[in-house]
Amino acid sequence: MTVTLADVAARAQVSPATVSRVLNGNYPVAAPTRERVLRAVDELDYVLNGPASALAAATSDLVGILVNDIADPFFGIMASAIQAEIGGTGGRAGGERLAVVCNTGGSPERELKYLTLLQRQRAAAVVLTGGAVLDAPHAAAVAAKLRKLGEGGTRVVLCGRPPVPDARAVALTFDNLGGARAVTEHLVGLGHRRLGYLAGPEERSTTRHRLEGHRAALASAGIEEDPRRTVHGQFDRRSGYQGALELLGRDRSLTALVAANDSVAAGACAALRESGLRIPEDVSVTGFDDLPVAMDVAPGLTTLRLPLTEAAARAGRIAMGREEAPAGGIGGVRGELVVRGSTGVARD
Amino acid sequence: MTVTLADVAARAQVSPATVSRVLNGNYPVAAPTRERVLRAVDELDYVLNGPASALAAATSDLVGILVNDIADPFFGIMASAIQAEIGGTGGRAGGERLAVVCNTGGSPERELKYLTLLQRQRAAAVVLTGGAVLDAPHAAAVAAKLRKLGEGGTRVVLCGRPPVPDARAVALTFDNLGGARAVTEHLVGLGHRRLGYLAGPEERSTTRHRLEGHRAALASAGIEEDPRRTVHGQFDRRSGYQGALELLGRDRSLTALVAANDSVAAGACAALRESGLRIPEDVSVTGFDDLPVAMDVAPGLTTLRLPLTEAAARAGRIAMGREEAPAGGIGGVRGELVVRGSTGVARD
DNA sequence: TCCCCTGTAGAAAGCGCTTGCTATGACGAT
DNA sequence: ATCGTCATAGCAAGCGCTTTCTACAGGGGA
């Protein structure tokens, strides 16, 4: 029924071993023989059986990319950049891996499930992107799983995620704290003293670090922290919309809204518009990440640009073994404040 | 080194066959035996070897999702919905498949490459989303590949893609033509007679069909078609921006800009704003798809809402064999016009 | 001339799992 | 008491590939 290695071997009048070697290109095969084999492969339209190959070789050409939400452009952009580095060129030796994106939906269970599935497939590498869940038991479970993956020969790379101790995993961390501080400092510099904060999901590392940066900036400006000026939600537009209404309902005198990311900020802008508040005259708004949407809201969003594409591409290269891991297995990625029209001097 | 089925069998004092059957749950195993096995699995922290299993069973639990551009929310949303249906529950029998998203970047070569890779992995199903490349040789190559996949037992589902003849593939097609006509008719109804069209990549089916719908609406309104009022580009924001400038440069008297999708429309809005033109007083703008960005541009985008999530979920279910394929293997999906602030009566 | 080295190909032993077929009790039926 | 029938469990034969080890030429160097 299906064509196998043996069929090719028969047709090319060589042994299966030789065919395998031609296909993998990691053993000397005389040129005429090679050509004969290649011709047979072509004539029979032979397709290697992946599972069999993976079983025999004890590795596969699968690379997993875990994302928290594939519908979120933040992850779409990273996944795209990683995959571009992975879907490379030629043979097991060279590259030619199947980059697969797995959507965890931010759920630790599904994250573990996917890691197990990838472990089961004996994946060549795994790249985990975005914030981690900080809940201790889950963090421990994930760490254990990553450790096992590493021991099993799977290369593990974290991109935009805190390092995992003992898990020979390379981590590229985003400077969320510093970035968030820069954003809030910008606002403070414009005279804002009453700022609302639209945070992400409570237990997420990204949420935590950005919030810390915000608070650090407030503290060093001598602004007292008021828990009623922070609301938690998801990292999406809807949460931004609802959160902004909530914050404004609690305290109409806020002059600035700091959002956990650009999608949230976009939602906040919509809420402000509908409330008849002008941006930035009445309320300034800031985002984070600098996704395309930052340019679509009017006025353009002041935000912190994260070099997502570059960082993700680097993660992909490291996962493929085409680039050195940073010293100590941990590399930091910094962002850059981009000032657009959504922020202005505070009213009053 | 690694724990195998045999280890589990030894520990549970049963044969490997029994362990396999407990794990797959498709053969009667006495309750006490089953429990003993399960306990052993747990104690040894056993993880099934996917390749070995796939080899022996001649199928795998991989489901491929092909997208043209993972960084585009259009595909992100669909991938997310498909994956949600696929990353189901329990055992080979029940569902528990590994949904993997493959980013073709719109390139036919990569599309073929991924299909081969999936064929190589003996994927259980493949879902292809979004427009197809219409170039004849490539279309034929893809069709041949899909046919082979189908013969190999892989279920093939097309979502938002034209049907492929002879390739026992289920197709869920979007009514791009009808939707585009509705959009343009809306504009014509508002008195617009000079409309620019920002099209997608030339050879893409989506581009073609939407353009046809637009032209059909113009024709039935007795508006003469002017090729200088159409520009082609990518399905992204940047193309919308540049295309709008180009179109306006050619003919400043346009009163409406019809975009191939929302991202393009968002770019066009930015271009209009920068050109000092008001939306919709000076120029009306329309999008297509109704992605989140449609609500972020100001004013909100009049667009054609496609039920992406529903359609994709359905495609996922069909791929999993959990839902009947539509009669004849082809199902149509219609959109709905959503009128927001970006369109108004034509000036003059 | 003989031997050893280098280059190339084959034989064969698995990799870890699934599954058709067979074996074994335990029962109720005859 | 005897036998057919279920319900379970084991045996063993692969699934299609990789890779170690062995075999065999041909070609120098001694």
Image (cartoon, coloured by chain):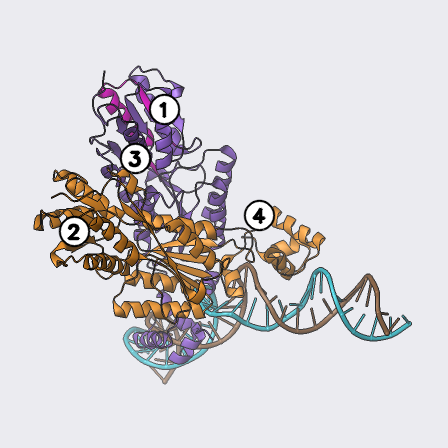
Chain colours: A orange, B purple, C cyan, D brown
Q: Is residue B123 visible?
A: no
- Graded by Cα atoms within 10 Å as few (under 14), some (14 to 19) or many (20 or more), the crowding at tag 1 reads many
Label 3 to label 4: alpha-carbon separation: 46 Å
**Amino acid type indicated by mark 4:** Asp
Have a look at marks 4 and 1 and say if they share a chain. no
Closer to the camera in the image, A327 or A263: A327
The residue range painted magenta reads: B172-200
Task: Identify residue for label 2.
Answer: A195
Residue B324 image point, x, y percent: 31, 46
Task: Identify residue for label 3.
Answer: B266
Residue B177 among those drawn in magenta: yes
Task: Identify residue for label 1.
Answer: B247
**Amino acid type indicated by mark 1:** Leu
As helix, strand or loop, the secondary structure at mark 4 comes to: loop
Vertical placement of B239 versus B1: above or below? above
As helix, strand or loop, the secondary structure at mark 2 comes to: strand
Q: Point out the frontmost of discs 3 and 4.
A: 3
Chain designation of label 2:
A
**Amino acid type indicated by mark 3:** Ala
Closer to the camera in the image, A149 or B237: B237
Chain designation of label 4:
A
Label 4 to label 1: alpha-carbon separation: 48 Å
Residue A125 image point, x, y percent: 44, 61
Label 2 to label 3: alpha-carbon separation: 29 Å
Have a look at marks 2 and 4 and say if they share a chain. yes
Chain designation of label 1:
B
